[in-house]
Image (cartoon, helix red, strand yellow):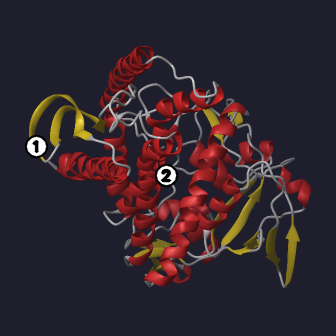
Amino acid sequence: MNAFLQAVLPFVGIIVVLIIVHEIGHFTAAKLAGVKVLEFGLGFPPRIWGFKRGETEYTINAIPLGGFVRMAGEEDPSDPRSLAAKPRPIRLLVLSAGSIMNLLMAVFLFALALTIPREVSIGRAVITEVVPNAPAERAGLEASDVIYEINGRDVKNVQEASYLIRLNLGEDVDITVKRERDFLTLSPHARWSAPDIVHVVEPGEDVQTVAERLGLSAATIRPAADIESELEPGRELIIGLGADAIAYVTQEGETVAWVARRLGVSEEAVSAAAGLPDPNKLEPGQELRIRQGATGIIIASQYPFTETQALPPWESLPQALQKTYESLILVRNEVISWFKGAGRPEVAGPVGIAQATGEVVEEAGWKSLTDFAALLSVNLAILNILPLPMLDGGRIVFILLEIARRGRRIAPQKEALVHFVGLVALLTLAVVVGYFDVLRIFAGESILR
């Protein structure tokens, strides 16, 4: 029941709303253009239920993989009220209207997320480590530098620092840091693809020896070895013995390394006080895989604290417009990075997205679903505009071919056949992806990590 409330219910709600918004875009544009709309459908046939109002049927269908607006003569211009009979600019607008509506919906959702009171990290990003021979080291960045600006934009926390670097992949990034009392602006290159640092533990090696061998810190090695480092909030730690003992109550988000730095004690002492396993023990043959990041810096928050923030609408709306635009850039960067060797695309179907929804709720709470829904809306807009048969982008391709052929259309029967093949391929892909999504869930694997 808990999984249903955390994953299935919010997922279905989000997807239904986004699909309805998308189809309303097509529906409204078609009506304004004088196109006859035969059916407004949620899901794909067979039909479960429906009713007719005016000349349009409104239906709910059995296959919950999308929705559609069925217009008269989408490929055949013989009907004067058909889509195909309209001028090419009108047809392009009607077919693009769904994606446009999803982008507008993303702006609304981002603005709503910024307006709703939420917890935001208040500690600036501090560089805890610079990977040897990485762009950051060559640019002169050092451990303990505190990041204040990236490309002229104020950086308030770790999340913003990571976001702005990913936004500028493939470019030199101007990073303004505070080093002791001085402010410096250094410009490391943000790589499209950064190779993982891989090390197989040899007999006799522990965290400290591996850290020295790789030129990294022990705090970086431990997460790669799955050594527990996050502390349970509200727990009292007694570190040391007798009169020199230190009593400390842990706060939300604190780690062994952070508490050790704050109290000026060893990480081993903090781990022992918290009842955690030996923080230096490694198993021979264990593979450690450490991700570098685009510039080769590892960052952490100055303070593990948050504060509640909520923006008024006149501030949240411009920021939402910017976030929607930048989401498109991040998608572009992600696609380019695949071709640059940064990994393979992660594909998920409805089952996988439902799992991701549940994980977002579990880790970040219900308020985070607004941001998540905005990102899904952006992705839905992009997916539908791709030049694939059956999708809006596939139909747009035929209009562009018509323009290239100086007004000569592809035969309606041939275009309809292409879209039918696309539908079959889409449904087949959904089944295959859904199968692997189910296997991942039964294996207990996360989709977000």
Task: From the top left corner, tell me how far across and down residue 68 is, in percent.
Answer: 30, 38
Q: Which of marks 1 and 2 is nearer the N terminus?
A: 1
Q: What residue type is labelled 2?
A: Glu
Say few, some or many: other residues with alpha carbon within 10 Å of mark 1 (under 14 / 14 to 19 / 20 or more): few
Residue 438, compared with residue 282, is above or below; it is above
Name the residue that disc number 1 marks. Answer: 52
Q: Is residue 280 visible?
A: no
Specify the quadrant of the image occupied by residue 165: bottom right
Q: Could you say which is closer to the camera, residue 57 or residue 77?
A: 77
Figure check: 36 above or below 267: above
Question: Residue 6 vs residue 126: left or right?
Answer: left
Q: Residue at x 33, y 51 (%)?
A: 18
Tag nearer the camera, 1 or 2:
1
Q: Residue 58: percent from the left, percent from the top?
A: 16, 43
Tell me which amino acid carries mark 1: Lys
Where in the figure is residue 121, as x and y percent of width and height? 52, 74
The residue tagged 2 is 228
Residue visible at 52% across and 27% down?
A: 398
Helix, strand or loop at label 1? It is strand
On the question of residue 419 being in view, the answer is yes
Q: In this view, does 136 lie above or below 158?
A: above
Which residue is at 67% across, 73% downward?
A: 155
Q: Which label sits on residue 264? A: none
